[in-house]
Image (cartoon, rainbow, N blue to C red):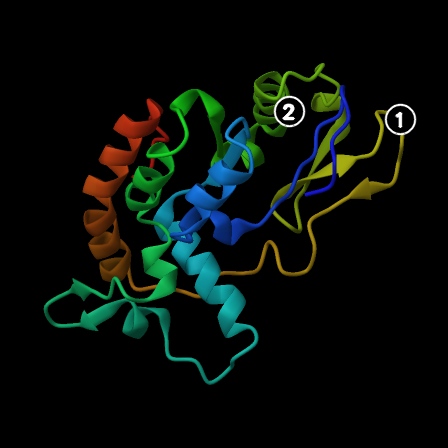
Amino acid sequence: MPPTLDGQLTMEKTPSYFITREVPARIYNMSRDTKLLVVVRDPVTRAISDYAQTASKRPDMRSFDQLAFLNSSTGLVDTRWGAIQIGVYARHMHRWLQFFPRSQIHFVSGEGLIRDPAGEMARVQDFLGLKRVITENHFYFNETKGFPCLKKSEGNGSPRCLGKTKGRIHPRIQPETIQRLREFYRPFNLKFYQMTNIDFGWP
């Protein structure tokens, strides 16, 4: 990490940090005062999104319905598959809480970022001890992408939207698959709600 002067914040973003076993200890040993931001979303939607992104590069990939289960007749979920494993947030969170107090971790709702980006960003700015500069005037909703876009300044007409890899059309998933995955994730979600003191409202 580069040196940080008084009055500055140094930020780094790597999604795989949250799920990589060795990272909490590594970051703690670098700086135990680090503040952590974790963006989470409904793990079923997240798994489908993960699949859609991978499948866009691998047209020969098996269907989501096939990959999600070890045995389709029994409905046993394949927890070895990364797309499923990542959404078991409580397991990953347990490792982080061994090194960092809950007060140093802020959770951002992925659904909230779409529904109320200014509200989510206000809470992020508060957590980081920053003046609230980003407001609702910096966002507009892009109907094509299905996500908000960010304006660099309130009066600037050139917004910054998420790239091509975001907002992909999701494949059609069998309703039975969705239901089985919701049942699989439910106890982990409830545990995660308890660990974070936040009810994200996932089905």
Instruction: Report the residue marked by disc 2.
Output: 118
Give whichever of 158, 193 is nearer the camera. Answer: 193
Instruction: Report the residue marked by disc 1.
Output: 155
Asked if marks 2 and 1 touch (Cβ < 8 Å), the reply is: no
Lateral position of residue 33 relative to residue 137, left or right? left
Label 2 to label 1, Cα distance in Å? 16 Å
Residue drawn at the location 81% of the way across and 40% of the way down? 159
Residue drawn at the location 49% of the way across and 39% of the way down? 29
Furthest-left residue in this view = 74
Q: Secondary structure at mark 2?
A: helix
Image coordinates of residue 15 in percent, x first then y, are 53, 50
Image coordinates of residue 181 in percent, x first then y, are 25, 54
Q: Amino acid at mark 2?
A: Ala
Give whichever of 78, 136 is nearer the camera. Answer: 78
Residue drawn at the location 33% of the way across and 59% of the way down? 84
Whether 50 is drawn above or below 64: the answer is above
Q: Quadrant of residue 75?
A: bottom left
Image coordinates of residue 101 in percent, x first then y, are 39, 24
Q: Which quadrant does the C terminus fall into? A: top left
Q: Secondary structure at mark 1?
A: loop
Whether 167 is drawn above or below 29: the answer is below
Q: Which quadrant does the N terminus fall into? A: top right
Q: Which mark is residue 83?
A: none
- Neighbour class for label 2 at 10 Å: few (<14), some, many (≥20)? many
Residue drawn at the location 61% of the way across and 55% of the way down? 166
Q: Quadrant of residue 186?
A: top left
State the count of labels.
2
Whether 94 is drawn above or below 168: the answer is above
Lateral position of residue 101 relative to residue 88, left or right? right
Q: Amino acid at mark 1?
A: Gly
Image coordinates of residue 65 in percent, x first then y, are 30, 69
In primary-sequence order, the first of circles 2 and 1 is 2
